Image: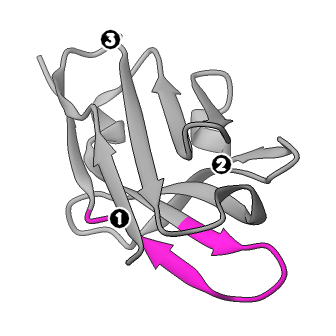
Amino acid sequence: QVQLVESGGGLVQPGGSLRLSCKTSGINFSAFTMGWYRQGPGNQREQVANIGGSGHTFYTDSVKGRFAISRDNAENTVYLQMDNLKPEDTAVYFCKARRTYDTETYWGQGIQVTVSS
């Protein structure tokens, strides 16, 4: 059974930091590109960042220089370090696993991140 379990969300003040984790099980983790997506109130789900099995990364423009994605293949976990958070970062954040050589995809259940004073 495939599971993606996010943790680390919560309420933080503007300028603060959070570190999201996504622990996976049931997949060959190193064969998957891992990504973080978010969906804010009234918005469509958008890609935030992803990281390939070799470590190649992508970031959407709005988070460049503030967020950092990383992965630990030994722990089957992907992380999203979020610094200098802004109110517009408020959203439900989702972890996504997509197998590199085909379209097999799995999603986590999502975790709330709220940036507010």
Spot occupied by residue 2 in the image (x, y as percentages of width and height): 42, 74
Residue at mark 1: 108
Which of the numbered marks, if any, corresponds to residue 19? none
- Asked if the magenta segment contains residue 13, the reply would be no
Q: Measured from the top left, where is residue 89 in percent x and y?
A: 36, 39
Query: Does residue 98 belong to the magenta stretch?
Result: yes
**Disc 3: CA contacts within 10 A as few (<14), some (14-19) or many (>=20):** some
| 54 horizontally vs 46: left or right | right
Q: Gap in Å between the C-alphas at discs 2 and 1? A: 20 Å
Instruction: State the count of labels.
Output: 3
For label 2, the crowd category at 10 Å Cα-Cα, with few meaning under 14, some 14 to 19 and many 20 or more, is few
- Mark 2: which secondary structure? loop
The residue sitting at 80% across, 73% down in the picture is 100
Q: Is tag 3's residue or tag 1's residue first in the polypeptide sequence?
A: 3
Which residue shows up at 26% across the image and 42% down it?
A: 90
Q: Specify the amino acid type for callout 1.
A: Gly
Disc 2 + disc 3, Cβ < 8 Å: no
Identity, as a three-letter code, of the amino acid under mark 3: Gly
Q: Is residue 74 above or below residue 116?
A: below
Q: Which quadrant: the C terminus?
A: top left
The magenta region covers 97-109
Query: What residue is shown at x 80% (from left), y 52% (from top)?
Result: 53
Q: Residue at x 83, y 41 (%)?
A: 55
Q: Position of residue 26 (x, y in %)?
A: 48, 69
Structural distance between the alpha carbons of marks 3 and 1: 24 Å
Rendering coords of residue 51 (x, y %): 72, 48
Q: Which residue is mark 3?
A: 16
Q: Earlier in the sequence, mark 2 or mark 3?
A: 3
Give the left or right position of residue 67, taking residue 92 as reference: right
- What is the spatial separation of the Cα atoms under label 2 and label 3, in whole angstroms? 20 Å
Q: Which mark is residue 60?
A: 2
